[in-house]
């Protein structure tokens, strides 16, 4: 709640912050200052008249540092949803005044909240003074009333302006007041502007910045096409390479809060003589064959492609850039191989050249080489039937030094067979073995990162199409000459994309042999792609054998049943301790169970919703709170998972995990119950009660869902299986029966599942 409502200019002396609490945190939120994450804060209500601005001068005591923010709404607590500030400032040291300006450009009064905050803690925090002024709008304060850009002007200042443009992409992001000038750049012309501090101390007290917004209008957060800042002077320029005159705004800003000038500004608009390759529509000759370009300079080139128009797959920077036009024949791969000793990025933009002029450019591929530079390879493959023109843009992260050069190799090669889905040829329909396949000649086209994928190593890959009849099993075995293979099976009906969703994945053995299987349980033939990749640093050749056979009968038949939960008695034994990620030691089953055809005599129960079966007598089932697909060769293996999730037993006795045996020998029913467990963290409101029931003699295993209660949680996805795995898995994690993984509404209160061997 605001401590005071202010509707007129006022001076408030000896305001106290030390007696207040820390209610609002601002760090990392839009337009907010980083200060004030743990210190006390105080709130005032300001009503700003229409078309006027407020200027707040806040002066802290000599020993502490303050921040000032304006916001429409204060969200208490850790603010994981995020504060959004109208404006904020914190650029002065302890004891120094902070000055914040904001313009209400609307035709009606606007009420906002002024928040004084600090990172410091009492008793260092003392009194502070506030001076709040309401001032008329001045020409040039915002884009809507910008003044024409002068050819030359002196005695300019920012003292009567507000801070409106501080956070746009590619802009000189400075926290002080700003002033806006307007201009129109004819096509084929360059705007160049310089701002220079004329403050008596030579610029120390006024550090300027200059940004260019290329648009017919602008708002707070608008991106900039060019910017620069400096200790006492800053220069920036921008070329209009488009087909029509371009309206722009030139924003003069500063990092200084109190001293707001004076400064001078000079500008020119004149025809620009672009070097070949400065922009997409002014490249040198089209590259049609592989070539190596050495000692490529940035001197004389400008930055036309930056953060403000960086779209999907692009990696644009704020420094100068160079453009190379390349014709990629049908069925060919382009590799743009750059090398430099400085940070840079490479992007590939599809033709025609007008695509480079989009307000948000979409790229075919991009790669950033940060920190100290180095070698970078960006790849585009033309899987179409016609030659495609693309533009390779090499972009320097920083503007200087302009003497730096780089090397660019343009490599155009035929896409090898099976390198991509488009080049994979006719699907395999019978058992066959392909010899001496070469990963070293392929590209890194696909990232195996879906739920059922074996993780990608980022190395080259090959894909093979296989048509699998209904009721048939595909088995693919790779034998390599010296690397650890990774195999994945991808649904061919979805097509191959750079980020794949897999039907199955395997990287079981740290050897040179890997096998993967997939069963077509549908009623129609399906074409899938088998992806081969290397987990080793240097891939070489391999052989791959494909076998197609009848699918074996499933180890268990799954059916849906109604829940019939057993009521446990005082004779039930606790089998998992109260707590998080706990397992019971191996204990004897009341009868021998045949599990996936092998006899087991012991069990171990996890608090995370699964029970393991084995014949061990010491230790416990492997601990894992993160659920996976079923089957999965990673631990835990040999499990029955009625609700595998990151669960926790909160308090005894209400949330115990217990086991009890019912019935007579020969037809007994062994029951494990997780009672009123919840999701981690323990403050989660949900409560789950479910059971595993094992029937003697028949070896039937049942899941019963007694109560899956959200208890006011904002979503019921988790209580119905949205982050859980359900099913059975054999002792090696190679065979399993899966009900679902991370699927909401997979189970509900009163439902059940029966698995019959």
Image: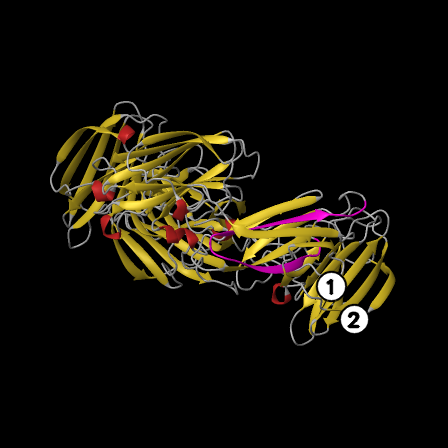
Among all residues in the image, which is located at the extreme right?
14
Residue 681, percent from left and from top: 55, 51
User: Circle 1 — which element?
Assistant: strand
Residue 689, percent from left and from top: 45, 57
Examine the residues drawn in magenta and state their main secondary structure: strand
Q: Is residue 298 left or right of residue 545?
A: right
Snapshot quadrant of residue 51: bottom right
Q: Is residue 82 left or right of residue 732?
A: right
Residue 659, percent from left and from top: 43, 49
For the residues labelled 2 and 1, the Cα–Cα distance comes to 10 Å
Viewer-closest of 718 and 755? 718
| Residue 731 on the magenta span | no
In the picture, the disc for residue 114 is: 1
In the picture, the disc for residue 6 is: 2
Q: Which residues are magenta?
A: 176-200
Residue neighbourhood size for the residue with mark 1, other residues' Cα within 10 Å, grouped as few (<14), some (14–19), many (≥20): many
Query: According to the image, what is the colour scheme of the structure?
Result: secondary structure
Q: In the picture, which quadrant includes the N terminus? A: bottom right
Q: Are marks 2 and 1 in contact (CB under 8 Å)?
A: yes
| Residue 180 on the magenta span | yes
Viewer-closest of 18 and 109? 109
Q: Is residue 660 left or right of residue 151?
A: left
Among all residues in the image, which is located at the extreme left?
430
Please give the name of the residue rendered at 68% of the width and 57% of the height, measured from the top-left corner: 178
Residue neighbourhood size for the residue with mark 2, other residues' Cα within 10 Å, grouped as few (<14), some (14–19), many (≥20): some
Residue 223, percent from left and from top: 55, 55
Say above or below: 754 vs 73.
above
The mark nearer the N terminus, 2 or 1, is: 2
In the picture, the disc for residue 445 is: none
User: Circle 2 — which element?
Assistant: strand
**Residue 680 visible in the current orientation:** no
């Amino acid at each position: 709640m605001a401590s005071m409502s202010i509707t007129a200019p006022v001076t408030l002396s000896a305001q106290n912050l030390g007696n207040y609490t820390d209610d609002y945190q601002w760090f990392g939120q839009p337009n907010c200052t980083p200060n004030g994450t743990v210190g006390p804060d105080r709130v005032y209500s300001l009503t700003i008249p229409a078309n006027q601005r407020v200027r707040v001068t806040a002066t802290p005591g000599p020993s502490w540092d303050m921040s000032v923010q304006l916001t429409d709404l204060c969200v208490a607590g850790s603010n994981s949803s995020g504060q959004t500030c109208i404006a904020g400032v914190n650029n002065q040291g302890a004891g120094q005044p902070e000055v914040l300006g904001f313009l209400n450009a609307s035709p009606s009064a606007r009420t906002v909240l002024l928040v004084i905050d600090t990172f410091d803690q009492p008793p260092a925090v003392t009194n502070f003074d506030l001076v709040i002024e309401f001032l008329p709008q001045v020409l040039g304060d915002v884009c809507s009333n910008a003044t024409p850009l002068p050819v030359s002007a002196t005695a300019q200042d920012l003292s009567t302006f507000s801070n409106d443009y501080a956070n746009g992409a590619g802009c000189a992001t400075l926290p002080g007041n700003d002033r806006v000038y307007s201009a129109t750049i004819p096509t084929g012309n360059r705007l160049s502007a310089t701002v220079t501090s004329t403050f008596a101390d030579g610029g120390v007290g006024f550090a300027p910045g200059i940004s260019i917004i290329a648009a017919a209008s602008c708002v707070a957060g608008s991106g900039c096409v060019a910017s620069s800042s400096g200790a006492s002077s800053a220069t920036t320029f921008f070329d209009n390479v488009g087909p029509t005159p371009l309206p722009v705004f030139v924003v003069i800003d500063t990092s200084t809060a109190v001293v707001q000038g004076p400064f001078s500004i000079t500008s020119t608009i004149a025809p620009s003589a672009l070097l070949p390759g400065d922009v997409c529509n002014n490249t040198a000759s089209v590259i049609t064959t592989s070539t190596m370009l050495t000692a490529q300079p940035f001197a004389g080139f400008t930055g036309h492609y930056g953060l403000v128009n960086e779209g999907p797959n692009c990696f644009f920077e704020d420094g100068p850039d160079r453009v190379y036009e390349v014709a990629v024949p049908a069925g060919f791969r382009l590799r743009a191989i750059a090398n430099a000793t400085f940070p840079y990025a490479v992007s590939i933009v599809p033709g025609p050249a007008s695509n480079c002029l989009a307000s948000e450019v979409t790229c075919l591929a991009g790669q950033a080489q940060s920190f100290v530079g180095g070698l970078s390879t960006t790849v585009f493959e033309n899987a179409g039937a016609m030659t495609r023109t693309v533009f390779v843009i090499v972009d320097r992260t920083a503007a200087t030094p302009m003497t730096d050069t780089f090397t660019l190799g343009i490599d155009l090669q035929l896409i090898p067979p099976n390198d991509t889905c488009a080049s994979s040829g006719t699907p395999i329909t019978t058992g066959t073995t392909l010899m001496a396949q070469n990963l070293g000649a392929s590209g890194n086209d696909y990232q195996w990162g879906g739920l059922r994928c074996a993780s990608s190593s980022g190395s080259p890959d090959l894909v093979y199409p296989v048509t699998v009849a209904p009721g048939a099993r595909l088995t693919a075995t790779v034998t390599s000459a010296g690397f650890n293979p990774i195999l994945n099976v991808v649904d061919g009906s979805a097509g191959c994309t750079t980020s794949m969703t897999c039907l199955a994945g395997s990287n079981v053995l740290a050897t040179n042999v890997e096998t993967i299987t997939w069963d077509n349980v549908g009623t129609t033939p399906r074409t899938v792609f088998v992806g081969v990749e290397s987990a080793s640093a240097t891939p070489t050749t391999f052989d791959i054998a494909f076998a197609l056979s009848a699918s074996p009968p499933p180890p268990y038949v799954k059916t849906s049943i109604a829940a019939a939960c057993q009521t446990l008695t005082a004779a039930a034994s606790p089998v998992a301790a109260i707590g998080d990620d706990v397992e019971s030691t191996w204990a004897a089953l009341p009868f021998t169970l045949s599990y996936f055809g092998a006899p087991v005599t012991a069990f171990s129960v996890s608090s995370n919703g699964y029970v393991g079966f084995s014949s061990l007598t010491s230790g416990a089932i492997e601990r894992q709170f993160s659920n996976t697909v079923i089957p999965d060769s990673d631990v835990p293996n040999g499990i029955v998972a009625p609700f595998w999730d990151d669960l926790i037993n909160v308090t005894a006795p209400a949330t115990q995990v217990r086991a009890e045996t019912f019935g007579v020998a020969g037809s007994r029913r062994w029951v494990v119950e997780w009672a009123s467990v919840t999701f981690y963290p323990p403050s989660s409101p949900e409560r789950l009660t479910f059971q595993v029931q094992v029937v003697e003699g028949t070896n039937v295993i049942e899941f019963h869902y007694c109560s899956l209660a959200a208890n006011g949680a904002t979503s019921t996805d988790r209580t119905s299986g949205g982050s859980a795995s359900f099913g059975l898995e054999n002792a090696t994690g190679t065979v399993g029966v899966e009900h679902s993984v991370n699927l909401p509404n997979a189970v509900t209160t009163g439902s059940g599942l029966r698995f019959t061997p």
